[in-house]
Amino acid sequence: MNKAGWIIMFLSVGSVLCLLAFCLIRVLGLPPAEMEDIKGPLEIDTGDTSDAN
């Protein structure tokens, strides 16, 4: 591979790694969710059993 191929490869791999690092920092840097905001499957009212025949 010549110099241009190496440069293109390093730029493409470097840009993907930078995007990955940016996304991970954004996601892992979020504040923790409060426990009251999280509902389990049994607490969710879907409304399909309220008027069952």
Image (cartoon, rainbow, N blue to C red):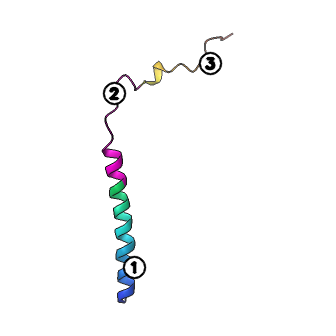
**Which mark is first along the chain, 1 or 2?**
1
How far across and how far down the image is residue 31, in percent?
31, 37
At a point 62% along the width and 18% down the height, the residue shown is 48
Distance from Cα at disc 1 to Cα at disc 3? 56 Å
- Along the line of sight, the residue nearer the viewer: 52 or 15: 15
Q: Label 1: how many residues lie within 10 Å, few (<14), some (14-19) or many (20+)?
A: few
Q: Is residue 53 above or below residue 15?
A: above
The residue located at (39%, 84%) in the rendering is: 5
Q: Amino acid at mark 1?
A: Ile
Gap between marks 2 and 1 measured at Cα: 45 Å
Quadrant of residue 1 within the rendered picture: bottom left
Residue behind mark 3: 48
Q: Which mark is residue 34?
A: 2
Residue tagged 1 = 8
> Residue 30 colored magenta?
yes
The magenta stretch is: 23-38
Identify the main secondary structure in magenta. Answer: loop
